[in-house]
Structure formats: structure tokens, C-alpha cells
Image (tube, rainbow, N blue to C red):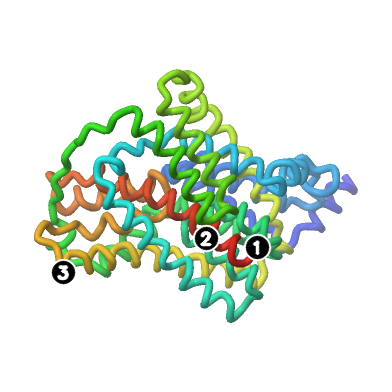
Amino acid sequence: MESILTNLAGISWQMIVMWIIGGVLIYLAIKKDMEPTLLLPMGFGAIMVNLPFSGAVGESGVLTTLFESGISTELFPLILFIGIGAMIDFGPLLSNPKLMIFGAAAQFGIFLTLCTASMFFDLKDAASIAVIGAADGPTSIVVANKLQSNYLGAIMVAAYSYMALVPIIQPPVIKLLTTKKERMIRMEYKDATVSQTTKILFPIIITVIAGLVAPESVSLIGFLMFGNLIRECGVLNSLSETAQKVLANLVTIFLGITIATKMQADQFLQVDTLLIMGLGLFAFIFDTAGGVLFAKLLNLFMKKKINPMIGAAGISAFPMSGRTVHKMALKEDPQNFLLMHSIGVNVSGQIASVIAGGLILTFFG
């Protein structure tokens, strides 16, 4: 009885705030179906680590052990990249290579945020924070780890939260920057046949090019492209399915609940954390805006107009961003199918964000 009273006395208002935050994440996962494999473990983990004298964290805590072995070593994010690579079909991109430029344009927010964040944090922390804008959790973790950022926890939470909140954050930004007429632009999709040889060579060539341009990106782009090579080689179908489903889901669950280690109230409810969350949102919004505005710029010189919404899919949140753009197009015009275009841009954004992360490591590592 005495120990129960001691535990109750250990509850602080900050812990209660974190319980509420955890509850909101669980609500979004279950009720709104927003990336439940990620938000549900994050939300539940946030509650676990904010109980008085929680045995889940600390020297012998299982979540601390998972963090040290899976995130500090970058093992979880890199293994997850194998699963993501196995999910990606580069066919729409290879049949229309010009979509690659939208992936590059959508990284604008990263470098704008780097300049802004450098006014509040030292350069390595600012560089780590800027990568949040790519909406690529694994890349954010690897960059923050390698740059030894003091704000790894806040960066991880911001990156994965914004990834899951793509359907909420992107539509208002897209609508603000486009007219209804622009959102109703139809784009013809020609399903050009892409040979298996091309699909096999693509991940190998991209890895070599990325390694020469940004050597620090080799582990990130290499694991992503290795996963894709498993998918496309044609002789490892069962392994590809395992990577896409079992491996990706299992690592995401462990990653989500382990991130909660850095959501302890005394670490999380600080001015710096709130500033990082704000800067991450700033980067995310301007990455989205950069892709949309670049598409609008191209339309000034093109006879066949591009639906500028596909530019927003150039962020790395695959396949959430591509689906969000497609759903917005259908809402404006039920006969407007942008899925193949938006997914093509989305996978190019996945590559571009990893290369951007590698360039930041090259410059500031």
C-alpha cells in the first residue's frame, strides 16, 4: 500500500500531459487509421515511459536496451529501409524519368530550414533538424546520430509524427497554393513497358551514383536499393514478400515503441523540443510548397500542363503522400486518376531525400 501511495505521489502534471499526448496518438492510429503500425506503439510507449519509476526505461529498462541496440547503432532504420525498398515499384518513375525533378524540388524546405534553424541551434543540430522536412524517419535518425545531435529524441518524434500526419498537413498547403482549375488538370499516363533488366540495373546504378556524389549516403541508399533489388530480381519472391510485410511491420513496431524512450516528460516538454517540432513543421510545409510551386513554374513553359499537386508528393513519405495527392484529385474530379504520376514523384522523393541527407552528412559530418 505504501509503495502504491509513493508511486501516486510521483505523478507530475508533465507526466499527465504526456499521457494525453500518447492517448491522442493512439486515437489517431485507431480511429483515424493514420499509420497505426507507427503511431499506436509511439502512443503506448509514451504512456509507458511516463509512469512514475517506470521499469521500461533506465539502465535495466527494456526500451532503453532496444534504443541502445536498435537506434543508437542505426540498425532499426537501416533494416526498415530494406522493407521500404522492397515495397517500392520504380516502374512509374522509369517509364517517365522527368518525374525525378519533382523529388529534387521538394527538398527545398530542408535547406531553407537549415538556414532558419542555424539561428537557434549550432550547425550540426540545425542540419539534423532540417532533415525532418524530408518526412523520412530513418534518414532523420541516421543523420542526427552521425552528427551527434543533442536533440535526437525530439527529431525522431517530429519526423515520424509528421510522416503519419501527411493527410492532415499537406492538403491545406496544396489548396493554398493552387486553384481549383489547376487541381482538376488531368494528366495522361502512358504505361510504357520497363524491362526487368532496367529494373534490376536501376537500384545498382543509383547506389553507385549516390555513393560517388554523397559517400555518406551509401548505407541509407544502399539498404533502400538492396530491398528494391530483392523485389525486382525475380528469384527471391518469398524473401521480397517477407521484407515488405513481416520485416517492415515488425521493425516499424519496435521502432515506434523505442522512439518513446525519448518522450519522457522531463526531456520532451522543453522549449527546445517545441521549437524543433515547429521547425520540423516549417520544413515539411516548405518541402510541400517547393514541389507544388516548381510544377506551377514548369506549367508556364509547357503545352501539356502538369497538375501541380503531384509536386507535393516529392517528399519522402511513401506511399502516404502519393495517395493523399491522388485522393485530392479524385475529390475535385472523380475521373481524374493521378495515382501513377503521384507515386512516381513520391518514389523519386524517397531517393532525393536520402541523397539530401547524405549531402548534409558530407558537408557537416
- Mark carried by residue 132: 2
Mark 3, Cα crowd under 10 Å, few <14 / some 14-19 / many 20+, is few
- Return the residue at label 1: 365
Q: Mark 2 falls on what kind of element?
A: helix
Asked if the residue under mark 2 is in contact with the one under mark 3, i.e. CB atoms within 8 Å, the reply is no
Q: Is residue 229 left or right of residue 147?
A: left
Horizontal arrangement in the rendering, residue 89 relative to residue 268 (left or right): left
Residue type highlighted by circle 1: Gly
Image position, residue 31 (x, y; %): 43, 44
Secondary structure under the numbered disc 3 in the rendered image: loop
Q: Residue at x 53, y 72 (%)?
A: 114
- 169, above or below 193, in the image: below
**Residue 115, position as x, y percentages in the image:** 52, 76
The amino acid pointed to by label 3 is Leu
Tell which circle, 1 or 2, labels the residue nearer the N-terminal end: 2
Q: Quadrant of the C terminus?
A: bottom right
Q: Quadrant of the N terminus?
A: top right
Q: Which residue is at a point 32% across and 62% down the rendered structure image? A: 291
Of the two numbered discs 1 and 2 in the rendering, the one whose residue sits closer to the viewer? 1
Disc sitting over residue 300 in the figure:
3
**Disc 1 vs disc 3: which is toward the camera?**
1
